[in-house]
Amino acid sequence: QLNPNDVQAEHMLASLLADQAEEQSGGHDGGVGGGGIGGGADAGGGGSARGGKAGLSRASPAFVQTLFDDFADTFDNKLASLQYVVPRLLGETARSLAIERGHLFASALDAGCGTGLAGQHLRPVVAGALVGVDLSEKMLLRAAALRVGQNAPGEAAVAASADLHPPGRPVYDKLIASDLLTLERAQLLDGALAGFELITAADVLVYFGELTELLASFSELSTRDGLLVFTCERVDERAAPRGWKLNPSGRFAHSKQYVENSAKLAHWNLIAYREIVPRYEGSTPVEAHLFVFKHE
């Protein structure tokens, strides 16, 4: 079991597992590792992998579940110490999109919700069901305990409409322990809903190399004009000819063009983009980007 107070130990484990998989695959064309605790606030069913063999581009769900179960109790505090801002950025983006639409979202999926850091910022702009999915049941237990008006470590309490979301109401309407790639609509949606109007993923993509399958899964869960907002770590195309690479931290980084091309294959059109600094590693800012897509 990992020491929940030792972030570097988790990073080392990621690298060791990646190196082991390299040896098994005969080189640097594949490998499995663990995600970094600073990399994704809410691991939603991926892992990290060193190299490009598609079948080895993510860790086993069982490994990721165990990893984040071990860190559940200290996760929020660790992210606060890294000046992690992705939950707030997702909330601000969702709020701007709701204003542009002229109404709140009828439903939303927080993919890889973890302990619910992003959900607290999404709740005010979701009038109907807010559903969270994560592999880690221990993370979900913490998300289930969240209430409107409650603040997480390093986060200010998020105000919400007293009519729709009175203080003390659970932030999430439904929480499901599942791999994002095996989700089915019936698990998540009430029969009256055609899909989610908003899907968000806070740094979940850092646990995947190839993105096509994940983005296709999101497409299946979206309404026709639904919106998808997510963040991932950024790499220049010249440093990652395939469009993605594994960083020494054990997390994947993706180029803008690769993400956009993969999204198009899954019927997502890019409507907004910005480069961001999601957190710091020591005094070094991490390079990342935030995408907003609209479903065709």
Image (cartoon, rainbow, N blue to C red):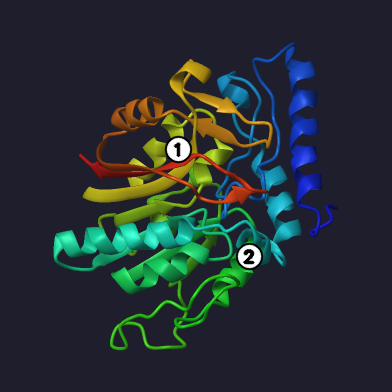
- Quarter-of-image position of residue 237: top left
Q: Nearer the viewer, residue 39 or 135?
A: 39
Badge 1 density bin: few <14, some 14–19, many ≥20, Cα 10 Å: some
Which amino acid is tagged 1? Leu
Is residue 275 toward the left or the right of residue 271 in the image? right
- Quarter-of-image position of residue 159: bottom left
Residue for point 78% across, 25% down: 19
- Quarter-of-image position of residue 269: top left
- How far is the residue under mark 1 from the one under mark 2? 25 Å
Which amino acid is tagged 2? Asp
Task: Report the disc number at residue 49.
Answer: none
Earlier-in-chain disc, 1 versus 2: 2
| Residue 223 visible, this angle | no
Whole-percent x and y of residue 172? Answer: 45, 71
Pointer 1: what residue?
Answer: 214
Whole-percent x and y of residue 84? Answer: 55, 57
Helix, strand or loop status at disc 1:
helix
Residue for point 26% across, 66% down: 106
Whole-percent x and y of residue 173? Answer: 43, 72
Q: Quadrant of the C terminus?
A: top left
Pointer 2: what residue?
Answer: 76
Helix, strand or loop status at disc 2:
helix
| Depicted 40 relative to depicted 259: above or below | below
Is residue 246 toward the left or the right of residue 111 in the image? right
| Residue 145 visible, this angle | yes
